Structures are given as C-alpha cells and as structure tokens.
Image: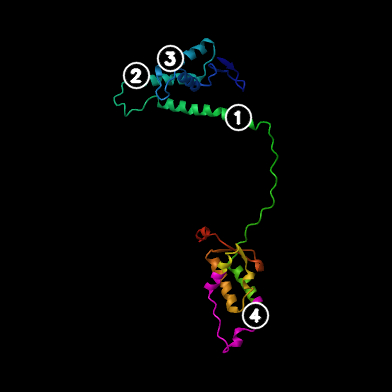
Amino acid sequence: MNQHPSPAGGALTFHLDHFDGPLDLLLHLIEKNKIDIYDIPIAQILTQYMQALDQAAAADLEIAGDFIAMAAQLVLIKSKMLLPRHDQAAEEDPRAELVELLLEYQRIKLAAPFLQQQGERGYGIFTRPPTPLPTARPAAYQHTPADLVRTGRALLRRAERRVPPPADAFTGIVGREKVPVEDKIAHILQLFAHRPWLQFARLFDGVRSRPEAVATFLAVLELSKTHRIDLEGQGMDLTLRLRPPGEEADAE
C-alpha cells in the first residue's frame, strides 16, 4: 500500500498494492483467481475485495470513497443474486453492468502504454512555424451570357473586316450558304479530342463567311448553356474547357 499527496496539496490518496481505483483491484482479483469475467462469483470476489480494504484500514489510511462505493455495489449485486428468480430468462443478470465497466476499463488500461509512448515521442521536439504559401490562384471568372455576347460581337466585327464583300452583293449569282449549328458543335467537340482547352478566338481563324461565324458562335453558346464546357478569361482571351462527363449532370 502506497500513500501519495495529491498534486493540489489537498487530501491524501492511496493505492492498494499499486491498484489505481476499485476497477483495477477487481481486475487483479479476477486474473489472480482465473475467473471468467462474464461469470464472476460475486461472493468470492467480495470477500477478497473487503480483505484489501481491511488492510488499508489497518494501516491507518483513509479509504477513498470510490473503493467504498464499489464495495457497496458488490454487496448489492450479491443480495440480488441471493433473491429467488422466478423467470431467469426475462430478468437481467445483476452483474451485467459491472462486467461492462470492467471490460471498458480493461480496454483503456491496455491502450494506456501506447498512448503514453505516443506522448513521449514528441517530447523535446520543436517545430518551426508554417511557411507562408504563395498567393492562391484566383477563382475562375464567372461569366454571364452578356459577356459572351459582347465577345462574340467583337469577333464578328473583326471577321467582317477580313471577309470579302457581304453576301447580298452576290444575290442572284450564288445561293445563300447554310451552316448548321449542330455541325459546328460536333467540330468543336472533335477539337477537344486533341487538347483539353481551346481559345475562343482561334475558332474563327478558318471562318469564310458570316453564316459560318454566327454558327460557330451559337455552337459555343449552346455548349456553355448545356454545361458541356466552361468559359474562362474575358474579352479576346476567352478560353473554352471541356467538362468531364460526370460533371455535366451535376451542373444542371
């Protein structure tokens, strides 16, 4: 039996043969007698438990309240087990709660050495403060349809300066060209097969007429509307990025 002053300088605490608390003492008695923890003979354990308390009293040590409370609980369990039980299947074993406490304490006791080792591992180690990270890249600019319309108009004006005379100058000479938007959509998606992004302005490099330029613009607008592509940048630096297949449904 050991006696130690409390850290705060208050009342004395004691250990019975290095047993920290009543549960520790009960586990020792169970292991010493090779008893099944799920079938504890309360009378035998209570006798040995009281003998340990008598030793503490004989040494003029003040017995902690939790040891006395556990002794009272053991007496109560013993009394319940002595009472006649009419329906054993329906009534709960009076020892069940005590068994749960012992199992939980046993798990904590087994984990204590590992936790102590982990705490000592970092003793005397000093870490430097975290290194500031570089400025994060700003989030992608969120465009509105109006931004795309303004960019498209600027490209159309530039295309007008490069194309031959307007189509109405050739009325009666050649038929009006029809460029399906679906063909331009398929063409743009085919370009994504070779690279993950496209420059919006470069889509108009091969444009030969206003209908083709309009169809290209409408194709980009439709792909953006159906969330199949993302638009990044602004003005003439607008960039198209193809969305992964799984993200198309999430965006809708």
- Residue extent of the magenta highlight: 158-187
Gap between marks 1 and 2, in whole Å?
46 Å
Q: Is residue 135 left or right of residue 68?
A: right
Gap between marks 4 and 1, in whole Å?
79 Å
**Mark whose residue sits in front, 2 or 4:** 4
SS of the residue at dot 1?
A: helix
SS of the residue at dot 3?
A: helix
SS of the residue at dot 2?
A: helix
**What residue is rendered at 41% in x and 21% in y?**
40
The number of numbered discs placed on residues in the rendered structure image is 4
Query: Foreground: 192 or 100?
Result: 192
**Marks 3 and 4: CB-CB under 8 Å?**
no
Gap between marks 1 and 3, in whole Å?
37 Å
Q: Position of residue 46 (x, y in %)?
A: 43, 17
List the residue tagged with mark 2: 82
In the rendered image, residue 176 lying in the magenta stretch gets the answer yes
**Mark whose residue sits in front, 1 or 3:** 1
Gap between marks 3 and 4, in whole Å?
108 Å
The amino acid sitting under disc 4 is Val
Gap between marks 3 and 2, in whole Å?
16 Å
**What residue is rendered at 58% in x and 73% in y?**
216
List the residue tagged with mark 1: 117
